[in-house]
Image (cartoon, grey):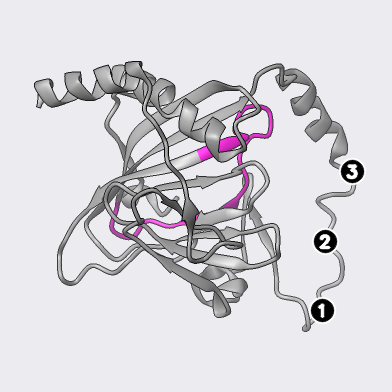
Amino acid sequence: VGGVDDRPLFIDQPALNRRVLEVLKPMHEAWIGGETPLKGAIAYGLRVYQGGSSLNMHVDKSNTHVISCILHIDHDDDPESEPWPILIEDFQGNTNEVVLESGDMLFYESSKCLHGRPREFKGKWYSSVFVHYYPEGWDTRRRTMENHFAVPPHWSQVDKESPEVEKLQMVGTSMKEPDCEDKWCAMRNTIKWYGPAKKNKVITTLHPDGYDFFYEPSLQEKEWHETAEMEL
């Protein structure tokens, strides 16, 4: 992520993150159809990106990061700052640029959908919380071993380069295309989405106008909100 001087900062909030993981779980279960109970893996943040940051394209861990969301907290309002979209490749083969506003929550299958922020962040700060779940009964160890044995021995061999194919460079567990603008060639042709989100609406690539999503908070969630308001 970026260089040495522009690495993201972490504001560790373990108690708050545990609350977020528990309170948001019913929303994620409803988003995937309401028939599959989920188990919380981790919620972490606040992650605060600084100017000059970028995030190569990647997928997350398939053993625990199955159903996920990004809860965007806020970003600076400097007039010289530019929107910093997250890039997600969907199951229909589209590359989507999503610009989130404060309070927006983006649901995605982070271990399947290639995602990142390859464009350099031109701003002062940008903060989010990242939340991950997996289905109850999910064999996390088996998923890890499946990934291990699915990688062929010749995976690192580089075929003869072709001028018709853009160069792909692996950086740890992420990737970039260094010869393209913003280090990802698919940014030449993207579908753009902008927040803020619409209340009681879920907007997807298949439902660009959104569909109704009425969620009734549990008693625990209502108590949490009341406690949070009292603390403020």
Q: Is residue 208 left or right of residue 33?
A: left
Q: Which residue is mark 3?
A: 152
Q: Which mark is residue 209?
A: none
Circle 2 crowding by C-alpha within 10 Å: few under 14, some 14–19, many from 20? few
Quarter location, residue 221: top left
Q: Marks 2 and 3, Cα distance to the nearest angstrom?
A: 13 Å
**Quadrant that contains the C terminus:** top left
Amino acid at circle 1: Ser
Estimate the x, y position of residue 218 in percent, counting from the top left: 38, 21
- Residues rendered magenta in the picture: 50-68
Q: Which residue is mark 2?
A: 158
Q: Which residue is mark 1?
A: 162
Estimate the x, y position of residue 188 in percent, counting from the top left: 56, 80
Q: Is residue 143 left or right of residue 85?
A: right
**Labels 3 & 1 near each other (Cβ < 8 A):** no
Estimate the x, y position of residue 174 in percent, counting from the top left: 61, 50
Q: Is residue 123 a member of the stretch shown in magenta?
A: no
Is tag 3's residue or tag 1's residue first in the polypeptide sequence?
3
Q: Nearer the viewer, mark 2 or mark 3?
A: 3
| Element carrying mark 1 | loop
Q: Marks 3 and 1, Cα distance to the nearest angstrom?
A: 22 Å
Amino acid at circle 3: Pro
In the rendered image of this protein, does residue 52 appear above or below residue 27?
below
Q: Residue at the location (41% across, 54% down)?
A: 2
